[in-house]
């Protein structure tokens, strides 16, 4: 029997309870699971800075941009990046409602997780199989995630950190001319990036509000 230290991070208590029930039902002859949960970025950050986990299950959107998240970096993606730096042997599985191809592509570019499960496809069997796979050195992606990968294997369009910063600051109501205070780009370059983002999101003729709404829908802010 293998003892596992697992960290589950999600801002919904119902999801965290689901992890507890699921892992309690896994055959004890297979795994002895020591589960720790966190519902905020800061809580998760403190845990991974003081503990080593075998597996981490992360949601993407943990805290929405607001007065308590001024840097816009309190996300599951950022926790994943931190985990890779602090504990590179920890297996990382994202469980998220986001199945957008761009969002998933960016997650794989920044974190390269060992698994990705779309929440609508979660079941006890799926979570146990995901554990089995990643612990054996393989990967696990749910059906919807696999479909996205197949469609985007040859797609090199990515959204970089400057793009994310522009989207985030726009969502806070900051005007384009003032974005130069947050990204090392000229106003002209920022306008060019906004046009590129609208093209990627297929809203070329829409305004900035539509760009923000689309970015939120796809999980970038």
Image (cartoon, helix red, strand yellow):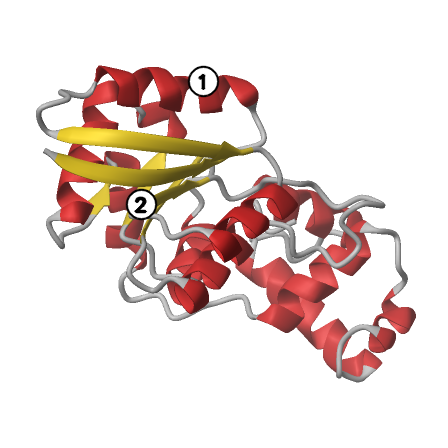
- Characterize the local packing of mark 2: few (<14), some (14-19) or many (20 or more) Cα atoms within 10 angstroms: many
- Position in image of residue 113 (x %, y %): 33, 55
- Position in image of residue 95 (x %, y %): 39, 37
Question: Which residue is identified by label 2?
Answer: 55
- Position in image of residue 60 (x %, y %): 51, 44
Q: Are marks 1 and 2 in contact (CB under 8 Å)?
A: no
Q: Residue at x 67, y 72 (%)?
A: 193
Q: Nearer the viewer, residue 212 or 131?
A: 131
Image mark for residue 17: 1
**Disc on the earlier residue, 1 or 2:** 1
Picture quadrant of residue 125: top left
Image mark for residue 158: none
- Characterize the local packing of mark 1: few (<14), some (14-19) or many (20 or more) Cα atoms within 10 angstroms: few
Q: Is residue 170 visible?
A: yes
Left or right relative to 202: residue 97: left
Q: CA distance from mark 1 to mark 2?
A: 17 Å
Q: Residue at x 76, y 49 (%)?
A: 69
Q: Nearer the viewer, residue 105 or 2?
A: 2
Q: Residue at x 88, y 59 (%)?
A: 174
Q: Is residue 145 above or below residue 52?
A: above
Q: Secondary structure at mark 2?
A: strand
Q: Is residue 121 above or below residue 160?
A: above
Q: Residue at x 64, y 47 (%)?
A: 42
């Amino acid at each position: 029997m293998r003892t596992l230290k697992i960290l589950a991070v999600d801002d919904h208590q119902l999801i965290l309870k689901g992890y507890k029930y699921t892992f309690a039902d896994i055959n004890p002859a297979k795994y002895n699971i020591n589960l720790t949960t966190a519902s905020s970025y800061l809580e998760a950050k403190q845990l991974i800075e003081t503990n080593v986990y075998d597996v981490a299950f992360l949601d993407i959107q943990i805290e929405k941009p607001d007065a308590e998240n001024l840097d816009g970096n309190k996300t599951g993606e950022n926790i994943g990046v931190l985990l890779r730096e602090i504990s590179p042997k920890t297996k990382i599985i994202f469980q998220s409602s986001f199945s957008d191809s761009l969002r998933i592509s960016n997650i794989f570019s920044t974190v390269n997780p060992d698994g990705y499960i779309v929440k609508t496809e979660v079941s006890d069997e799926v979570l146990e199989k995901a554990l089995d796979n990643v612990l054996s050195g393989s990967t696990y992606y749910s059906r919807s995630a696999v479909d996205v990968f197949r469609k985007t294997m040859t797609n090199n369009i990515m959204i970089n950190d400057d793009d994310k910063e522009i989207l985030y600051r726009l969502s806070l109501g900051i005007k384009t001319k003032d974005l130069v205070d947050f990204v090392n780009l000229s106003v002209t370059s920022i306008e060019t990036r906004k046009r590129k983002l609208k093209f990627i999101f297929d809203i070329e003729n829409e305004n900035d509000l539509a760009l923000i709404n689309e970015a939120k829908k796809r999980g970038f802010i």
